Image: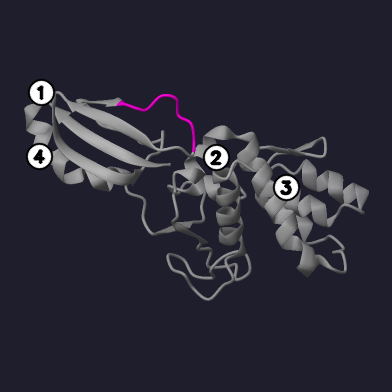
Amino acid sequence: MKGKAKLMFNGKVIAEAIDVTFSPAVTLPEPVEFIPPEPLDYPTSFTCTMEIKDPAQVKIWQENLAKLFTVPERIFFWRQRDKYGFMSNFYRASVTIDGLTYPTVEHYYQAFKAQHQDDLFAEIVTAPTPLAAKKLGKKALLPANWDEMKFAVMLQGVKAKFDQHPDLAHALLATGNALIYEDSPYDIIWGTGEAGGVGTGQNLLGQVLMTVRGLLAAGK
């Protein structure tokens, strides 16, 4: 969501950042009072105001206002504990698709591979961790056209995740137009194949996330 941020002191605007991206996840240190726009209705524009209480903080906030809100041009994620870890398929956000609930997107994606192997399917769905689900998925007998359909399957799972978890949808929308990369050094299909860089991988998961972000922004 794009908008304008104003920094106030003694009732006067002392700094202003225009065309910044706002996320309700932003945490501001004291003694700044943060007044968010109401309602938080994505993806509309907004104006927010920060009122400084301590004169000693004025210069600090003037210098860091834009940095606080501006989203980088490129976003890299991989591990759940990273800043953008919520984008990971291993992130603990359940998805319900066709009446069945999966603990994570990874559980859904791996289970889809085994949709005609009832025992394996059930084992994947109830796997204790997404990593365990991924390992079990390697036992699946893939459909003949799996390479052609896997992107659509992943898209369905990721879209369900953000549709069903508004807080995560807001966080994804808050990335604006940033390019998104899963910088897994081990995955050259869904990731970049290089930690901390664009790499030579296909980055299909990054493409899925940007597609979902576009759909959310369009209200679809």
Tag 4: amino acid: Lys
From the top left corner, tell me how far across and down residue 16 is, in percent. 20, 40
Which residue, as the protein is rendered here, is positioned at the far bottom?
Answer: 200
Q: Is residue 38 magenta?
A: yes
Disc 1 is placed on an element classified as loop
Which one is nearer the viewer's eye here, 33 or 134?
Answer: 33
Of tags 1 and 2, the one toward the viewer is 1
Determine which residue is flagged by label 1: 10
First in sequence: mark 2 vs mark 3: 3
Quarter placement of the C terminus = top right
Determine which residue is flagged by label 2: 169
- Residue 59 tag number: 4
Disc 3 is placed on an element classified as helix
Residue drawn 74% across and 52% down?
109
Answer above or below: position of 166 versus 89: above
Q: Is residue 164 visible?
A: yes
- Residue 107 tag number: 3
Of tags 3 and 1, the one toward the viewer is 1
Disc 4 and disc 1: Cα gap in Å? 14 Å
For the magenta stretch, what is the residue range? 35-42
